[in-house]
Amino acid sequence: MMNPLGIYLHIPFCVKKCDYCDFLSFPLIDLYQKEKRMEEYLDALKNEIRTRSRGLKNYRVNTIFLGGGTPTVLSGSQLDQLFSVLHESFSVDENAEITMEANPGTLTKDQLSVFVARGGNRLSLGLQSAQERELELLGRIHRFKEFEQSFFQARAAGIENINIDLMSALPGQSAEDFFKTLSTVLTFEPEHLSVYSLIIEEGTPFYERYRKDEENRERGEIPHLLPTEETERLIYHQTGEILNRAGYEHYEISNYARKNRRCRHNENCWKRIDYAGFGLGASSFFDPLRRRNETDLEQYIKAGGLPPFEEEISLSIREQMEEMLFLGLRLSEGVSISEFEDKFHQSPLAVFSKTLKKYQSTGHLLLQDGHIFFTDRGRDVANMILADFLL
């Protein structure tokens, strides 16, 4: 029997880099640079897929995820070439979940036609906000009308599984502002929503603008530009309540899905199922090995997509245990005690006894029906608790 495998493809180009973004991506400034760089990169990427796939013949692909950057800067022809190489190199399940991230304003009928013809069945649209002022603040290239156009184009192309990305806790944003966006988005009836609080990342224009305000908030002082922690928590809780009433399951800290519409690719990553990453800076996981590709674009292209891995780590048993807790607790069902015992021949109740007792007593964690999972209160401070599980 062949083992299941997820595939991630990284397209590191954007029309313009958003002001909050610290992802490994580059803006395409002019047409010459776009055409030249894109072809060079795709040649290297296809070479990496063909070469590294030779060592993965005992796997069958059940999820594919095109991320970035902005994968929809690729033309329909370039997408077609990429999928041709994938299908030549791997055995792909007929019912595989195949996702493409898309930025409103870059999606075309030609791209969608190729994507669907090649088995694409899930689209992730980066809306972030339905408010024009907030889109401009974030440095997005699109406006709400471009999102509407992209959404209905995808539906017309036959895509029945659409995720919408939203961002909360923006500078100057009130809870009412965010809930206006959420209410607007729900009228489109997407199958999945990813809702993330803004993080002020070092090295971004937002860091220069809001760093001091973020530091004030971390000290417990009232920020001038960013929402308070109380507002952020209010948005988080009420979002869950609103989406629950609308028929969405809050299945992961930041993700909500209609029945049978969870993102299988991300869920498999959280469950530590093997995946192969191709492209600049892409990560792979073959338990217990974690790898990260070269992050220098020039070096990646020069080596034809096959430079030495930038990082390669074989996780110790201790690190594997930590990771199973760290990732599994993100999911609503949490961590299965029996699965942990089957893998490590130890109980998590013994390995993590002190930390589990601490957060059970404070009402942040529950042990029930053979699982360890967060309470609603625990999800509020999930990152702090997860860090405490590092042995």
Image (cartoon, rainbow, N blue to C red):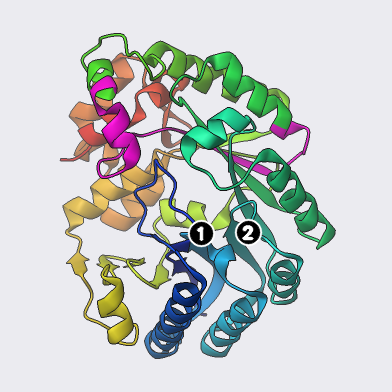
Q: Residue at x 41, y 67 (%)?
A: 274
Image marks 2 and 1: residues in contact by CB distance under 8 Å = yes
Quadrant position of the C terminus in the picture: top left
The amino acid on which the numbered mark 2 sits, given as a three-letter code, is Thr
Q: Which residue is mark 1?
A: 15
* Quarter-of-image position of residue 344: bottom left
Residue 31 in sight in this render: yes
* Part of the protein shown in magenta: 185-213
Above or below, 91 against 158 in this view is: below
300 inside magenta stretch: no
Crowding at dot 1, Cα within 10 Å, few <14 / some 14-19 / many 20+, comes out as many
Residue of label 2: 106
Q: For numbered disc 2, what is the local secondary structure? A: loop
Q: Position of residue 62 (x, y in %)?
A: 57, 69
- Percent position of residue 323, x then y: 29, 49
The residue lying at 38 percent from left, 42 percent from top is 337
Total count of labels? 2
Residue 346 is at least partly visible in this image = no
The image position of residue 96, as x and y in percent, is 63, 68
In the image, taking residue 202 as reference, residue 105 lies left or right, namely right
